Image (cartoon, rainbow, N blue to C red):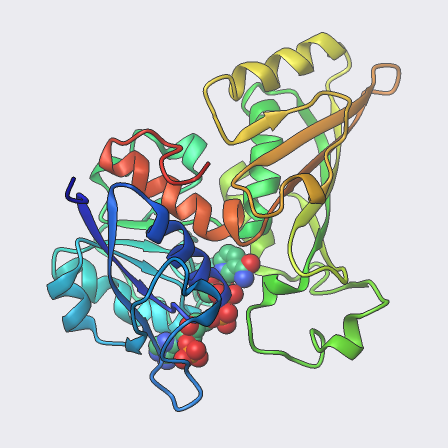
């Protein structure tokens, strides 16, 4: 059977781009039409780790070629590069799923601060947290796929927030594996710097904090940490509920919110762990609640490169194409 959609991946040699090739090569309804990177001399021309799945070549980035050969393009590029090429591809009739942060923030002041290269758009991007964006995805020409940290935080917080049960400050203590920073090492992510250590970074100043607050519509204290594992995010989220909330109410709100969400697993008081979600598109959520003090601690985890990046982007495409959301992802 002919595969229905031809995709391009711009940024295919990066961590998220390679995950997209892995997913796209196995997807029954998708053909990979183009895989591109910077074309710099250090760019690989093939991907040996994926040679059992995909035998294509990596080509230098070409907007015209992507537009001519692909129905849909995934951008797994640095923010300023995605900012420049996303609107050009949309103008040429291509559906764009952008994994960078560049189109996520709607407030112009926040956007200028965190993503100064982002141009003004006639039509804002659809924020692609799949579980809350299903209705908008089929018509969307530009989808801003959420960040890895915001995906876990929002899936954990939205059900209670939407039910009006969150009171007071929300604290998100987040830990991420090193692949969250991409393939190019820096002093912070160099093996000898991060091995055997845990560090907090960008405290009270991480752009994902602005994204979480935008989508939640309330303030949240977000503190990311780097932990010496290659992939995975775990967030411990501290919330005060209103006084009359019961344990059963919390369970029922989470269960109801994700009843029809195949990639959100709700575990109640069995707290999730990173090792159960790596290399999957699942976001696992558990919690402990003390009704006496109305203190709720939620734990959410996911794989930053799958549900936090390539997997969620592919899930969004499945929804946009009217396919079963899990196609090619299980
Ligand atoms: N890592 C994560 O967990 C994660 C999660 C969610 C979202 N994201 C976002 O997704 C995007 C990609 O992240 P990543 O971690 O996969 O990054 P990465 O590993 O650093 O890969 C970046 C990719 O972009 C290409 N590239 C860089 N500059 C380019 C240019 N001027 N023209 C064309 N291609 C260029 C690189 O190609 P070369 O090989 O030629 O350099 C590489 O393929 C980023 O915006 C990131 O914020 C990442």
Q: Quadrant of residue 46?
A: bottom left
Name the outermost residue toward the right. 292
Q: Is residue 330 left or right of residue 289?
A: left
Residue 240 in view here: yes
Q: Position of residue 167 (x, y in %)?
A: 70, 27
Label count reads 0
> Which residue lies at the image location 62% right of the left edge and 78% below the top edge?
185
Q: Is residue 104 left or right of residue 275?
A: left
> Which residue lies at the image location 59% right of the left edge and 16% below the top edge?
255
Foreground: 319 or 214? 319
Foreground: 144 or 229? 229
Q: Quadrant of residue 277?
A: top right
Quadrant housing the N terminus? top left
Q: Position of residue 65 (x, y in %)?
A: 16, 71
> Which residue lies at the image location 65% right of the left edge and 80% below the top edge?
186
Quadrant for ligand 1 reads bottom left
Q: Position of residue 6 (x, y in %)?
A: 20, 53
Q: Is residue 100 left or right of residue 90?
A: right
Q: Is residue 295 left or right of residue 216?
A: right
């Amino acid at each position: 059977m002919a595969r229905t959609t031809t995709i391009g991946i711009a940024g295919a040699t990066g961590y998220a781009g390679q995950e997209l090739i892995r997913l796209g090569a196995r997807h029954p309804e998708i053909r990979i039409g183009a895989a591109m990177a910077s074309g710099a001399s250090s760019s690989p021309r093939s991907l040996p780790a994926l040679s059992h799945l995909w035998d294509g070549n990596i080509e230098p980035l070409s907007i015209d070629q992507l537009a001519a050969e692909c129905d849909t393009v995934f951008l797994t590029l640095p923010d300023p590069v995605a900012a420049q090429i996303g609107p050009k591809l949309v103008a040429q009739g291509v559906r764009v799923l952008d994994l960078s942060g560049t189109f996520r923030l709607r407030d112009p002041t926040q956007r200028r601060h965190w993503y100064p290269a982002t141009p003004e758009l006639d039509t804002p991007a659809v924020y692609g947290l799949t579980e809350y964006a299903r209705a908008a995805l089929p018509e969307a020409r530009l989808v801003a796929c959420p960040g890895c940290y915001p995906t876990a935080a929002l899936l954990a917080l939205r059900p209670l927030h939407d039910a009006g049960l969150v009171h007071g400050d929300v604290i998100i203590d987040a830990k991420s594996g090193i692949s969250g920073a991409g393939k190019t090492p820096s002093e912070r992510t160099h093996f000898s710097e991060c091995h055997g250590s845990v560090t907090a970074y960008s405290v009270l100043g991480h752009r994902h904090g602005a994204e979480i607050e935008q989508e939640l519509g309330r303030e949240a204290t977000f503190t990311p940490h780097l932990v010496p594992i290659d992939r995975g995010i775990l967030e411990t989220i501290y919330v005060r509920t209103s006084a009359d909330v019961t344990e059963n109410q919390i369970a029922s709100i989470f269960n109801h919110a994700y009843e029809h969400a195949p990639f959100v697993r709700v575990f109640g008081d069995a707290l999730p762990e990173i090792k159960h979600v790596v290399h999957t598109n699942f976001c696992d959520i558990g919690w402990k609640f003390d009704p006496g003090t109305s203190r709720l601690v939620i734990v959410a985890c996911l794989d930053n490169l799958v549900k936090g990046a390539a997997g969620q982007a592919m899930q969004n495409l499945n929804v946009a194409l009217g396919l079963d959301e899990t196609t090619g992802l299980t």
